[in-house]
Image (cartoon, helix red, strand yellow):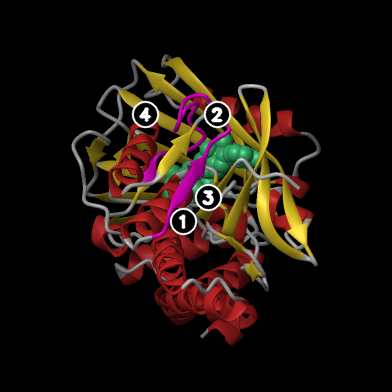
Amino acid sequence: MEFRDRYDVVVVGAGPGGSVTARFAALNGARTLLLEKRQDIGSPVRCGEGLSKAHLHEAGIKVDKRWLANEVEGAHIISPSGYRLTISEKHAGNEVGMVIERDIFDKVQAFEAAKAGAEIMVKATVTDVIKENGDVIGVRVDHFGERFNVKAGCVVAADGFESQVGRWAGLNTRLKGGDIMSGLQYRLTGVEVDPAYCEFYLGNSVAPGGYLWYFPKSEDTVNVGIGVMAKRVKEKADAKTYLDRFIEKDPRVRKGKPLDWVAGGVSTSPPLERTVAPGIMLVGDAARQIDPITGGGIANACRSGRIAGEVLGEAAQAGDFSLSQLMKYEKGWRALMENRLYRNWLAKEKLAKLSDETLDKLIDSLADAGVEKLSVLAILHAVQKKYPELVKDFQELL
Ligand SMILES: Cc1cc2nc3c(=O)[nH]c(=O)nc-3n(C[C@H](O)[C@H](O)[C@H](O)COP(=O)(O)OP(=O)(O)OC[C@H]3O[C@@H](n4cnc5c(N)ncnc54)[C@H](O)[C@@H]3O)c2cc1C
């Protein structure tokens, strides 16, 4: 087998997870290559562009005017009959705080990786992993039609929701139908929305098994999107019907003109059982680190990317890419977020089954109790007070 190059670390995918991994691997002394199959990092955007400020510092990312479109004060959560819970940004959870320009955000993260010393190739598609005695030792690359092999101490699969690299390496990345959300979104301009608040609409009549969102980019432009549980709609087109119907009924956005259209899948599964195997690590959506309730995954991809990069830098310095060294990543990201991901997955399983009537009661009781912190626990305690029968099924989460 001929290899054109050899790197300590080869990262597949220049989304936020991949770029942050490459940045921290390079910063910590690893010879790093970042491969992106698209011609333009960050584009086209497949994202609602909602991001909280809460965890970015853990990934070494500072809020940056280049990608910040709008800062919000909080979020309204609205039940099918219109009960409304308003929460402040501080307590809103993972996807409220900022609305960003996601294409620029991704480019800035790749820029930081380059600044740290990583090499980057665009239009470079990884077509397979190369194994020796079952261990991953490199990747096959198609770069502008030229095919070659690259050897790596470790390959990082940061190739997103549809991740093939992890599967090629032999990790079980399969998703159940109930753990896949279909997401669709218009960016509408010429609307009249309150730029200070994101809005989330719940209910089976609105978005079966998911929710519908308004993320304002300014007072006249908003991302209006929907996530529906894939197995709860007959065809993908059904999600668009729900979204179009909702927009048509809202006079604030009905006359909006679309600037773009986004469609993509989101996993809402529990975390993978294994995200590391000899010669390979999975980061971000590829590792199913996305929040199963909100479908938000930017922050978690960045947070775990930093851990991956630091572990890989250490591996390169020590010349030790053994499984026990790589397992430090597995332990590190799980310590940071696994409990929350698992708890939110359990809650999502239950919430997705609630009727519109129950959701009305839920939001009513939360608004009544003045719930501020939108954690699963805070919600359950508040609902227990007013509608104890509603939380019977959630006892294990309390
Ligand atoms: C409709 C929709 C709305 C969303 N809204 C939000 C939101 O508001 N807030 C939020 O936090 N999250 C949101 N998400 C989720 C968020 O987009 C992801 O969690 C995030 O992009 C994960 O980052 P990542 O780096 O793991 O993967 P990605 O950003 O998916 O990056 C993967 C990269 O790998 C590249 N790639 C794939 N295969 C190969 C290959 N073989 N060779 C080379 N390159 C390859 C891809 O081109 C891509 O650039 C949304 C998702 C969807 C679909």
Name the residue at 51% across, 30% down: 122
Q: x, y (%) of residue 114?
A: 34, 41
* Residue placed furthest toward the left: 65
Q: Nearer the viewer, mark 2 or mark 3?
A: 3
User: Ligand 1 near label 2 (Cβ, under 8 Å)?
Assistant: yes
Q: Label 3, on which residue?
A: 11
User: Ligand 1 near label 4 (Cβ, under 8 Å)?
Assistant: no
The alpha-carbon separation of the residues under discs 1 and 3 comes to 13 Å
The alpha-carbon separation of the residues under discs 1 and 2 comes to 19 Å
Compare marks 1 and 2 and give the one earlier in the sequence: 2
Q: Quick one: 368 or 379, which is closer to the camera? A: 379
- Marks 2,3: beta carbons within 8 A: no
Specify the quadrant of the image occupied by residue 217.
top left
Q: Label 4, on which residue?
A: 222
Compare marks 1 and 3 and give the one earlier in the sequence: 3
Amino acid type at mark 3 = Val
Read off the magenta span.
Answer: 30-50
Q: Is residue 212 visible?
A: no
Q: Label 1, on which residue?
A: 301
Amino acid type at mark 4 = Val
Q: Nearer the viewer, mark 4 or mark 1?
A: 1
Q: x, y (%) of residue 324?
A: 58, 81
Q: Label 2, on which residue?
A: 38
Q: Is residue 53 visible?
A: yes
User: Ligand 1 near label 1 (Cβ, under 8 Å)?
Assistant: yes
Name the residue at 62% across, 51% down: 151
